[in-house]
Image: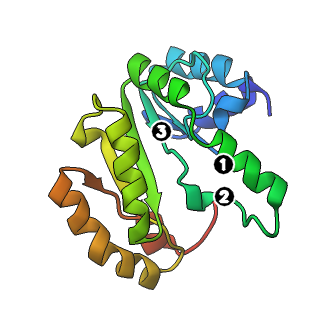
Amino acid sequence: MAVDEIVAQVEEWDCRHVVLTGGEPMLFAELLPLADRLRERSLHITVETAGTLYLPVTCDLMSISPKLASSGPEPAQHPRWSRRHERQRYQSDVLQSLMHRYAYQIKFVVDRAAELDEVEGFISAFPTVRKDCVMLMPQGVTQSELAHRTTWLEPYCHERGWTFCPRKQIEWFGPVRRT
């Protein structure tokens, strides 16, 4: 879809905020003119990225969601993709650039309590990250999964001064795409 078509669709809605996401938007150079055109309309722009690629995009907030080790494909089933995921999922220089150049938040999707050590390690590697910029969200596609993970993840966030992010779209709409 062309930039003009996307901007026209955005203009049909009465909104002031736009989130550019879906897969990895930083893969596409078309992100740059799209963000510029949206800025011309005085929209607040958030870019959601895994933090593995850098583009000098116009935005108000960089929502960085680093991938934890468990987020990759199963090594036995997809050995090549698993190795690639592990090799590329953490790009310290890109993360540092994004956090230096943009207002940002760091958002982790957490499946198991054992992953919290990895989150802590990530945060300690970037000592300038403010606590109020760290967000943890439970992994899950059903309300019962989310409720179970919330019981230990929410207090963990509060103890550290981080933000707990419930997955309201699951609560409101269920596991439906494009919500």
Q: Which residue is mark 1?
A: 86
Q: How many marks?
A: 3
Q: Earlier in the sequence, mark 1 or mark 3?
A: 3
| Quarter of the C terminus within the rendering | bottom right
One can see residue 32 in this view: yes
Residue 138, horizontal then vertical, whole percent: 42, 66
Q: Mark 1 vs mark 3: give the one in front.
A: 1
Q: Which residue is mark 3?
A: 64
Residue 58, horizontal then vertical, whole percent: 52, 18
Q: Earlier in the sequence, mark 1 or mark 2?
A: 2
**Up-down relation of residue 58 to residue 48 (above or below):** above
| Residue at 55% across, 35% down | 51
Q: CA distance from mark 3 to mark 2?
A: 17 Å
Quarter of the rendering containing residue 176 = bottom right
Q: Which residue is mark 2?
A: 72
Q: CA distance from mark 1 to mark 2?
A: 7 Å
Q: Badges 3 and 2: C-beta atoms under 8 Å apart?
A: no
Q: Badges 1 and 2: C-beta atoms under 8 Å apart?
A: yes
Q: Secondary structure at mark 3?
A: strand
Three-letter amino acid code at the position of disc 3: Ile
Q: CA distance from mark 1 to mark 3?
A: 17 Å
Q: Mark 3 vs mark 2: give the one in front.
A: 2
Q: Left of 86 or right of it: where is 81?
A: right
Quarter of the rendering containing residue 27 = top right
For the rendered model, the colour scheme is rainbow
Three-letter amino acid code at the position of disc 1: Glu
| Residue at 75% across, 46% down | 84
Q: Secondary structure at mark 1?
A: helix
Three-letter amino acid code at the position of disc 2: Gly
Q: Left of 99 or right of it: where is 162?
A: left
